[in-house]
Amino acid sequence: MSFRNVCREYRREYSREMIFGLVLLMLVGLSTWLGTYIPESLYLNGITQIMNGCIATMCLAGAWLMMRHSEGMKIRKIWVMVLLVYAVFATTLLMRVTSFVDQPRTGFMSLQGWQMLVGNFLLWLLLLYPTEALRPGWLNLSRAILHGLPVVIAFVVDEVTSIDLRIILALYPVVLITLLAQHIRHYRVWCEENYSTLDHIDAQWIVRYIIMCLFDGVLFFTLCFVGSISVAFTQQWLLLLIIGYSTEQILFRQDPQFLELEVEEEEPKTTVMESNVEYRQILEEWMEKEKPYLNPAFRLNDLRKVLPLNRTYLSQLINSEYGCSFYQFVTNYRIRDAKRLLHEQPEMKMQDIAEHCGFSSPTVFARIFARETGKNPSEWCAKQDANETI
């Protein structure tokens, strides 16, 4: 695929997220500007208390709902923990035990080192859920601690020595978000290795989540420098948005990655490696005879009906024998059937061809066909007719 096509595909896939980011940028800018007109006494004695109360209430309500519908899923338990920690933090601010907008200490930064450490900790918590969502099973306690350890070391060095490392404390949230963004590619690969249709299972909502966290990190960085009430106000309502939006998505979205993730026993590698040729023959005969790829919901685990392998080795078999992912493997069969129908039955409607070949919709069929052949179905048919005429 050419660079231009890659850019076009990227814009198509993430166009809504780009619009979302631009709208959020305008709202953040407008809120920060309007916040400059809020009197300090009104903010400290009224608005901030209301905002912290809303955050604590939303976190407790979300944690309660999540616990009732956790269904034993590790990923939802992680979000419950995040909500409870934020509820405690907001309640602490509500009771005026401490304040995040404080008098600056000596130097050019407005927040003290411990305040920056707390800010990093809170953002680090927000990134635990999407990390597990994008790479299920990858996140464990040691990796989570490793992500947050650099900022703790920087804080200790800053406190016990004369070296001022607060700039690192201010910038580290952006580093965490950048690391998180790298997992999006792994999620895409995971989907392609397990599902034959990528519609409705990709991580667009997590991209929006990351965008909101990125803005939150930028606001925190700004707050470290200026200690502005308008910035603190904007960060508070943005946190409300993150918590409310994410809780709703986690509770109600239907992502097969979590609904169908199975724990399977590992098969001996020697058995698999010695039988690849036989497995390939069995697989191809089954695909030709039963045509399971005509079902849009066809997935990698369905291959276990004919091959005695677990998910990991099934994926390795497809990758090693065919040099592609399961998604591409199935797509090749679907495109082959689509070409046959376009050639043999040119009067068929695109919708009927899409349904017959296992595509979820005519739009998806046209897009994938153009990506695989370089031409849309009508152009491909016209070229075939021209070749036959010649």
Image: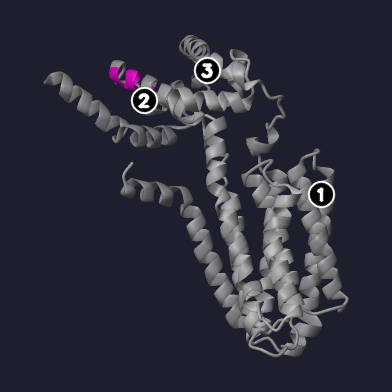
Render colour scheme: one colour
Q: Amino acid at mark 2?
A: Lys
Judge whether 148 appears above or below 79 on screen: below
Circle 2 Cα neighbour tier, 10 Å, few/some/many (<14 / 14–19 / ≥20) = few
- Which SS class for mark 3? helix
Q: Looking at the figure, which quarter contains the N terminus?
A: top left
Q: Position of residue 82 (x, y in %)?
A: 77, 57
Judge whether 375 appears above or below 138 on screen: above
Q: Nearer the viewer, residue 114 or 352?
A: 114
Q: Nearer the viewer, mark 2 or mark 3?
A: 3
Q: Which residues are magenta?
A: 338-343
Badge 1 is on which residue? 65
Q: Position of residue 36 (x, y in %)?
A: 63, 86
User: Which of the marked residues, 2 or 3, is nearer the chain's N terminus?
Assistant: 3
Q: Quadrant of residue 187?
A: top right
Q: Amino acid at mark 1?
A: Leu
- Which SS class for mark 1? helix
Picture residue at 16% right of the left edge, 23% below the top: 387
Judge whether 265 appears above or below 137 on screen: above
User: Which of the marked residues, 2 or 1, is nearer the chain's N terminus?
Assistant: 1
Picture residue at 11% right of the left edge, 21% below the top: 390
* Magenta stretch: dominant secondary structure: helix
For residue 292, which numbered disc appears in the image?
3
Badge 2 is on which residue? 349
For residue 169, which numbered disc appears in the image?
none
State the separation of the CA atoms marked 1 and 3: 39 Å
Judge whether 106 appears above or below 118 on screen: below
State the separation of the CA atoms marked 2 and 3: 22 Å
CB-based contact (under 8 Å), mark 2 and mark 3: no
State the separation of the CA atoms marked 2 and 1: 46 Å
Q: Quadrant of residue 100?
A: bottom right
Q: Nearer the viewer, residue 377 or 137?
A: 137
